[in-house]
Amino acid sequence: MRLRVTRAVWSAWLVGIALSLCLLRWSPASHAQESPSDSVVALLDIGAPPGHSVFGSGFLISPDGIVLTNAHVVLETQRDPDRYRLIALWHVEWFSVSLVCASSSGSDPGPLDLTQTVRARRDVAEVRLGPALVDRSIEVQGRRWRPHTGPLATFPYLVFAVRDPGTGQQVETPAYDFSGVPPTPITKRGRVLDLLEAPDGTPVIVVRYTTPVEHGESGAPMLDTSANVVGMLTWASASTSADGVGIAQSALRTPCP
């Protein structure tokens, strides 16, 4: 009797493993299984006059195409929507971009001098991706992106950390590099140097990266080691080119209160 019970238990255990492997193989992937960089988009303006191009990064926070970025990235679209038309590049396609809301950033900010009073302020915008406005490929710096037509995909998205980061915490920032040809996804690595508060009360993070902060990385997510959003890269530092200054996640949960 003991031998028969042991065989039965062994058989059930093997069946359970087989079923688990089948489920693992055939279950659809969740957003947590995607690379964090898959949730980052490049944002740029196709209506700007020569020498006045607007571009930045953003990250998806919902499967239906809601993206967070900086308000200064969408500033010209707010001021003159007839001339400035923002689009998003994601993988090999381009999408239309509609503005949901944005804080009043005033202007595209320059680098911050952190030895003086912190001049940071709330600089957050929420936009929505949509199908391409025209069925035509777009060339950006030598590379062509095809238009996304028809229904939108279910986008991989990022989630917020439960708290703002602490000093010394390691972070990664997937962003788009616009200094090369064409715009290219990159990942910056660094650690938190300081936590500050802007004059308007916005919580600010200072991160020392291993590489310089470049124009076009504004709006990229700052991620902890679990790939959760702890902040948004927004400014460079005037004192050290490798220092990036971002808005903490606690101010990103309600983009336009």
Image (cartoon, rainbow, N blue to C red):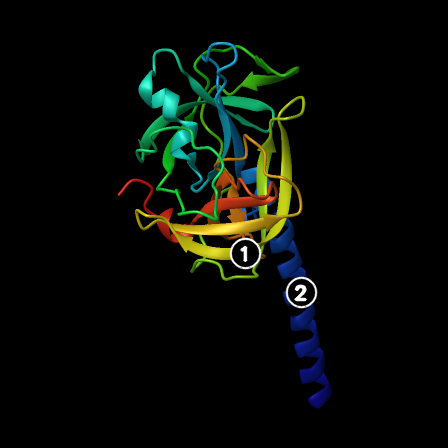
Element type where label 1 sits in the image: strand
Which percent across, then down, holds residue 157?
49, 43
Residue at position x 29%, y 40% in the image: 256
Element type where label 2 sits in the image: helix
Examine the rendered structure and indicate whether residue 152 appears above or below residue 119: above
Which percent across, then down, holds residue 189?
63, 48
How packed mark 2 is, by other alpha carbons closer than 10 Å (few <14, some 14-19, many 20 or more), is: few
**Mark whose residue sits in front, 1 or 2:** 1
In the rendered image, the quadrant that contains the N terminus is: bottom right
The reply, left or right, for residue 241 in relation to residue 252 is right
Amino acid at pointer 1: Leu
In the rendered image, the quadrant that contains the C terminus is: top left
Residue at position x 59%, y 18% in the image: 145
Which percent across, then down, holds residue 134?
46, 11
Which picture quadrant has residue 64? top left
How packed mark 1 is, by other alpha carbons closer than 10 Å (few <14, some 14-19, many 20 or more), is: some
Q: Which residue is mark 2?
A: 17
| Front residue (pair 26, 86) | 86
Q: Which residue is mark 1?
A: 193
The reply, left or right, for residue 232 in relation to residue 168 is left
Q: Residue furthest bottom?
A: 2
Examine the rendered structure and indicate whether residue 59 appears above or below residue 132: below
Q: Residue furthest front?
A: 116
What label does residue 117 carry, if any?
none
Which picture quadrant has residue 75? top left
Earlier in the chain: of badge 1 and badge 2, it is: 2
| Front residue (pair 251, 242) | 242
Kindly report the distance in space between the C-alpha atoms of the residues bearing marks 1 and 2.
46 Å
Amino acid at pointer 2: Ile
Discs 1, 2 touching: Cβ within 8 Å: no
Residue at position x 33%, y 23% in the image: 78
